[in-house]
Amino acid sequence: MTVEEQAVFTCRNAAGQIGVVETGYLYPSTAEDQRDFAFSISHTSSYVRGYADQLYIKARGQQQRRATKVEYNTDEFYSVFLKRSWADLANGCPPVAGLREAEHAIAVVEAGYRSVANGGAPEPVDNAFQDRCRLTALPAATPCDELLCESNFNADLNSAAKGPLFAACGRPHHARPPSPLDICPS
């Protein structure tokens, strides 16, 4: 088996938080069941787990967890992402994900390849992305997001996204992920 077939990354960010990512192409996919997708996030205030078609959320101190049905088939979101990207461009908004984010993601993958080549030794990731851009959470509503909510394809966004990506309040802008809000130097 090669790193191209199966890989497990254990990452630690500058703040000391640890994340584990497993990815691979060994899942015996079919047209109806294309991939195994799961994640979990543990925090001092809550625990979140996504698996199959469910999202489970349990806050610390709560007896009962909440469960929501979601769509994890990423093929369903290609048209949503494309329409969102075109709308952001047309409205002069920064992209939800751009070349700088892609550059940083590739730097993480390249560090994984270097680690494999060095027998699994830890490898640093260039932090130039964070040096160039201050990352902050997007406010709940911005003029760009208001334009998106009123656009002609809003119904397509909500029908294609059957989960938390756009369902926080029934309007897509509340679930937009963090993005660089500052204008980065070219």
Image (tube, helix red, strand yellow):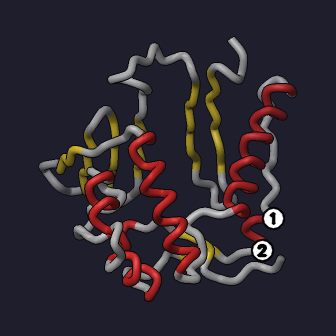
Residue sitting at x 70%, y 83%: 183
Point 33% across, 50% down: residue: 47
Rendered location of residue 53, percent (x, y)? 27, 37
Callout 2 environment at 10 Å: few (<14), some (14 to 19), or many (20+)? some
**Residue 151 at what x, y percent from top left?**
36, 76
The image quadrant where one finds the N terminus is top right
Look at 55% across and 78% down and name the residue there: 90
Residue most toward the front?
152
Depth check: give the residue in front, 159 or 58: 159
Amino acid type at circle 1 is Ala
Locate residue 181, reporting x and y percent: 60, 80
Quadrant for the C terminus in the image: bottom right
Horizontal side of 25 relative to 59 (left or right) equals right
In the depicted view, which residue is nearer to us: 185 or 8?
185
178 lies left or right of 154: right
Within the image, what quadrant is residue 44 found in? bottom left
- From this view, report whether residue 3 is shown above or below residue 144: above
Determine whether, in the image, residue 100 is placed left or right of residue 47.
Answer: right
Q: Which mark is residue 132?
A: 2
- Residue 152 sits in quarter: bottom left
Is 173 rendered above or below residue 36?
A: below
Q: Disc 1 to disc 2, how far (Cα)?
A: 6 Å
Q: Give the tally of numbered discs.
A: 2
Instruction: Label 1, secondary structure: give it.
Output: helix
Which residue in the structure is indicated by mark 1?
Answer: 128
In the image, what residue type sits under mark 2?
A: Arg
Helix, strand or loop at label 2? It is helix
Of residue 177 and residue 149, the one placed in the foreground of this image is 149
Residue under the point 42% across and 49% down: 77
Instruction: Characterize the local packing of mark 1: few (<14), some (14-19) or many (20 or more) Cα atoms within 10 angstroms.
Output: few
- 157 to the left or right of 93: left
Q: Does 139 sit above or below residue 84?
A: below
